[in-house]
Image (cartoon, helix red, strand yellow):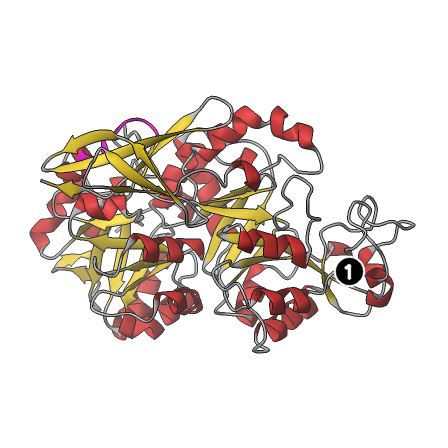
Amino acid sequence: MKPLYQSIRASFSKDIYMPVCPVVAAPTVVWEVKCADDLSALTCPTPPQNVILRVSPDLTVEGKPLYDALALCSRTVPILYIDDEATVAPLTEFCDLNHVGDAILCTAFEKKELLAKAYDLMPMLRGMLDCRGGSPEIEKLPSVCVSNGATSVILDPEVATAAAVHSLQQRFIHTVTYGHFGKAAARGVNGIITADLAGAYAFLTSFPEGTNFRRRALIAHKGFQNNGKYSENTITSVVAAAEHHFEGAEIDVKLTVDNVPVVMHNTNTKGLFDCEVAVTEESTYEFLSSLRRIEHPNETIDTFADLMHKMKEYPDTPVLIEIKPSAKYHKVELLTALTDEILRDGLSQENCICIMGGTLDPGLRYVHKRIPDLPLGWCESGSGVPTTKEESEDLLYRVARLSEGCAASYNCEDVHCSRIFNEYAKFRMLHVFVWSRSWTLSPSKWEENGPSNDKTYLSGFDAWTTDHGEYFLGYPIALEPTENAPECILHFRDGHTETALCEELRVGDDKYYLYKIELHFGDSYYICSEPKGE
């Protein structure tokens, strides 16, 4: 029997069913095979976008050969569900012989160690934990997932509230649930298990262009600089991000010559500090701490430890730590070890994420081995927006190879992201978050790149890392119908509410309410309420 695919790259080439959907980052439609006849859904006119296949040790799915089941997955991304440790070895051999690289491994939460073992042997595949019937506290789930190789979870509907879903997505974990399709979609989940495939697609095509169910995270790049009010990469700017209710604050960490981790982006002090130009990693901490910032003379350089100790007061604002030694100094191992020590000293915020650029050696896999429960992001700049299915598949394949062996998200520059790429990424449960090129230090960049910023903002990624967070803080994040609907309550990041008249939309037996938000350069989008039944 010939291999299923000619190469691992070929396994990423799928004609996934995508109706013309006006919903941005619509949840994927997931089918769960429970009997042999269920496999026929994979060849129907509206096939699922993900399918759950329970794989037995004899490599069958409900009595049918796994080979035959996967051969039907030309329009869907399979989720290979493992119940028995005896399945791992033959499945590993099967995936190797058949060049299967585009699939998701899944086990029950209580068998999470089984997923870790399978993922270690099949590191190209994504991981998922099935938490139906019980799971740990939501705030602990990301660390449990990542340490076992998972980037997504299946939750019971009563657990998958809008707040819980957003909390998991905030730390790069995708959520899948089941039940009332409209209610689940309006809570912002990434995928919905349903038995009504055609009905699910009909639901998603009922909304106006630009509808958003999912709340994206707003991350302050180098802390919240607030149009120059605060200096980048300081305790002050990171605390400001927390106090302004960002979903995260990104910082950069380097080592001084005497091996003190400091919060600093640049290779030298030029433009930031009032001194002769000095190379950051060739200077002592004592020298750097004596310097004062040009625009903020009360600020110096902060240690990573001091910043993380302060952020323990703000556990709801994750710190995105970019490990950023200059390649010239080759201190990834030491900086990773010191980062681990600081995060585990009992004084630091534990709600953290690590991101790392692709030019450093050793790479992301090393960081994962050293700090296995820390959510990770693969950071990459570049140009060439993927605008076709083939270009998107090429990029997905490359990201899968570069992050092989660790449950990592993809952190890309805004010029390397598009709606079509995000569509193809979501079927793989790949978390995509972008960083904007409109830097605070170059205010003209905001105007220059403004229209493309709008387009990127509407492309469906999961989080937005920006220097210009002040322009996005005023957008409402949720919509709640009142008894006097279409009058609704708008909820904002800082906790305040306002009332507004919203558009009413009837879908089946439910009513939804939509509020239109105008972006800065002419584009707009809608946020959507949970359904209100008659």
Is residue 57 at least partly visible in the picture? yes
Give yes or no for residue 476 being in the magenta stretch.
no
From the top left corner, tell me how far across and down residue 501 is, in percent: 28, 30
| Residue position marked by numbered label 1 in the rendering | 329
Residue at 54% of width from left, 55% of height from top? 242
How packed is label 1: few (under 14 Cα within 10 Å), some, or many (20 or more)?
few
Chain part drawn in magenta = 203-210
Query: Does residue 168 appear left or right of residue 347 in this picture?
Result: left
SS state under label 1 = helix
Query: Does residue 462 appear left or right of residue 309 in this picture?
Result: left
Query: Does residue 162 appear left or right of residue 418 in this picture?
Result: left
Residue 446 occupies quadrant: top right
From the top left corner, tell me how far across and down residue 336 is, in percent: 64, 67
From the top left corner, tell me how far across and down residue 215 is, in percent: 38, 45
Q: How many marks?
A: 1
Residue at 43% of width from left, 41% of height from top? 461
Q: Is residue 327 above or below residue 382?
A: below
Q: Is residue 91 above or below residue 422?
A: below
Give yes or no for residue 209 being in the magenta stretch.
yes
The residue furthest right is 276
Residue 45 occupies quadrant: top left
Residue 458 occupies quadrant: top left
The residue furthest top is 522
Is residue 360 at least partly visible in the picture? no
Residue at 66% of width from left, 59% of height from top? 235
Hey, what amino acid is under mark 1?
Tyr
Residue at 68% of width from left, 28% of height from top? 444
Quarter of the image that includes the C terminus: top left
The residue furthest bottom is 346
